Amino acid sequence: MNIIALSGSLRKGSFNTRLAHAIATRAPQDVTVEIATCHGIPLYDGDLEEAEGVPSAVTDLRERIRAAAGLILITPEYNAGMPGVLKNALDWLSRPPKEMHPTFRDKPTGLAGATPGGLGTTLAQSGSLVVLRQFKVRLFPDHLRVSRAHESLSEDGSVTDGTIETLDTWLGDFVSFVRGG
Ligand code: FNR
């Protein structure tokens, strides 16, 4: 089974992309977690869309999401919300409107996020529910939140014990959810 994990950070040292890698590393043997980012996606501009259509960075990502059995959105938290980079990517992915539901409708989707702060991107995750409701995804109700990410997610890919346990439990339950259990 293939799951795609989309990190909403462009930063090389991103904690959220580190979390995506940790999820990929900890996935059960029969599950492949493909990591995606929002690199290469321009700012949404209706004139650009009209003149040139949807950019290939978006159509490529869309194909990857469609091919995956499940989607994990890994959102940083900026000013209590989802970063513009991720919202912009989701906006493009919903264009043109006829593409939105074949991409997202009923897609088993989990929310994850990492922050150096203490509240594990709770507010960004809550805010993103509005978009996910619009997309009509099949949302996994339990969200993965990593606080103090600078302590728990290292540059070399190692993850502290408590975070590994939380991640493994969440991931196991999410994989069952994707499988329909
Ligand atoms: C932040 N950060 C932040 N963290 C948080 O927990 N709640 C918040 O509201 C905010 N707000 C915020 C605004 C802006 C503009 C920036 C740049 C940062 C800190 C943020 O969690 C931190 O920079 C993370 O490292 C960003 O995620 P990546 O890039 O490490 O994945």
Image (cartoon, rainbow, N blue to C red):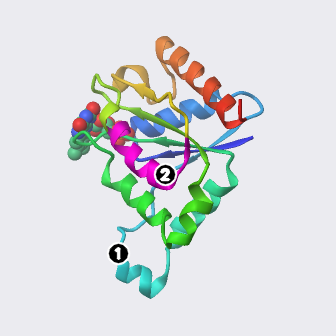
Residue visible at 60% across and 27% down? 171
Q: Position of residue 111 (x, y in %)?
A: 48, 37
| Region of the chain picked out in magenta, as a range | 124-138
Quadrant where the C terminus sits is: top right
Q: Which of the 4 image quadrants contains residue 2?
A: top right
For the point 33% across and 46% down, which residue is it?
82
Q: Is mark 2 within 8 Å of ligand 1?
A: no
| Residue nearest the viewer, comparing 155 with 5 | 5
List the residue tagged with mark 2: 37
Label 2, secondary structure: give it. loop
In the image, which disc is placed on residue 147?
A: none
- The correct choice, above or below, for 85 with respect to 53 in the image is above
| Along the viewing direction, whichever of 24 and 96 lies nearer the viewer | 96
Q: Is 133 in the magenta?
A: yes
Q: Residue 172, located in which quarter of the rendered image?
A: top right
Residue 19 location (% of width, % of height): 48, 33
| Front disc: 1 or 2 | 1
Residue at the spot of label 1: 45
- The quadrant of the picture showing ligand 1 is top left
Q: Identify which residue, 158 or 42, lies in the foreground.
A: 42
Give the camera-side residue of 15 and 166: 166
Q: Amino acid at mark 1?
A: Asp
